[in-house]
Image: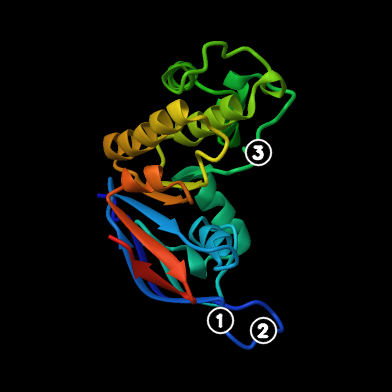
Amino acid sequence: MSAGLRVEQLRMRFGGETADLFAIEQLALAPGASLGIRGPSGAGKTTLFNCLAGIEAPRSGRIEWDGCDIAALAEGARDRWRRHAVGLVFQDFHLVDGLDALGNVLLPAYFGRWRPSADERERAAALLQRVGIAAPRREVALLSRGERQRVAIARALLQRPAALLADEPTASLDPEHRAGVATLLAEAARETGAALLVFSHDLELLARLDRCLELRDGALHETR
């Protein structure tokens, strides 16, 4: 059974600095639960996001996803873990402009095999419909920023990841689609048992999550 996220004694300090950017003594997130993290500019939110996603290694501490301490893994092993265990939604989308919307959603499937399965293609099409993309064969270079963000969210959900991390997932969306995306992320986490972690300034989005913390002065503080 999935164990969610468990963080202990997590510290990050950049070379040449004399103080930690942040020091997080303890943090836990159960499978199917959602957590929002907000904070002022420069507080270290992006760095914390990268550490929890296995993109960047912390100075010290444990970051356990389902019992696997990714902070102790070498870079290559973290990359392999991330491909199979986590769905990422970035503010800048990271889509491939030469592909259509469906092709971008299917990209994670190509890491494990030569071509996606029929079930994966069907799920990708269903996810695009669910996030409001009516033309799955349209090149993403022709889509609006809001449409591109919705494609990125569908891609993150393709493989039913145990961990779902989003960095400002509603920043490029209009109010109508912001509400829809917030609902989609929360529902997807509950349906698949994924632990949902959202970094955002969107107070309406954060209010839809189970819990919200603020990264401030190098530590996480309860907001509600």
- Residue 112 is left or right of residue 220, and the answer is right
169 or 87: nearer the viewer: 169
Color encoding of the figure: rainbow
Above or below: residue 43 compared with residue 212: below
Residue type, mark 2 in image: Glu
The residues tagged by marks 2 and 3 sit, at their Cα atoms, a distance apart of 30 Å
- For the residue carrying disc 2, how many other residues have a C-alpha within 10 Å: few (<14), some (14-19), or many (20+)? few
The residues tagged by marks 2 and 1 sit, at their Cα atoms, a distance apart of 8 Å
- Residue 212 is left or right of residue 61, and the answer is left
Instruction: Name the residue located 71 percent from the left edge and 84 percent from the top edge.
Output: 16
**Percent x, y of residue 195:** 34, 49
Confirm or deny contact between disc 2 and disc 1 (CB under 8 A).
Answer: yes
Q: Does the rendering let one see residue 1? A: yes
- For the residue carrying disc 3, how many other residues have a C-alpha within 10 Å: few (<14), some (14-19), or many (20+)? few
| Of the image marks 2 and 3, the number of the one nearer the N terminus | 2
Q: Which residue is label 1 attached to?
A: 20
The residues tagged by marks 3 and 1 sit, at their Cα atoms, a distance apart of 29 Å
219 or 223: nearer the viewer: 223
- For the residue carrying disc 1, how many other residues have a C-alpha within 10 Å: few (<14), some (14-19), or many (20+)? few
**Percent x, y of residue 131:** 45, 23
Residue type, mark 1 in image: Asp
Confirm or deny contact between disc 3 and disc 1 (CB under 8 A).
Answer: no
**Percent x, y of residue 44:** 56, 67
Instruction: Name the residue located 44 percent from the left edge and 26 percent from the top edge.
Output: 176
Q: Which residue is label 2 attached to?
A: 17
- Residue 72 is left or right of residue 197, and the answer is right
Residue 70 tag number: none
Q: Farthest residue in the bottom direction?
A: 18
Q: Which residue is label 3 attached to?
A: 94
* SS at mark 2 in the image: loop
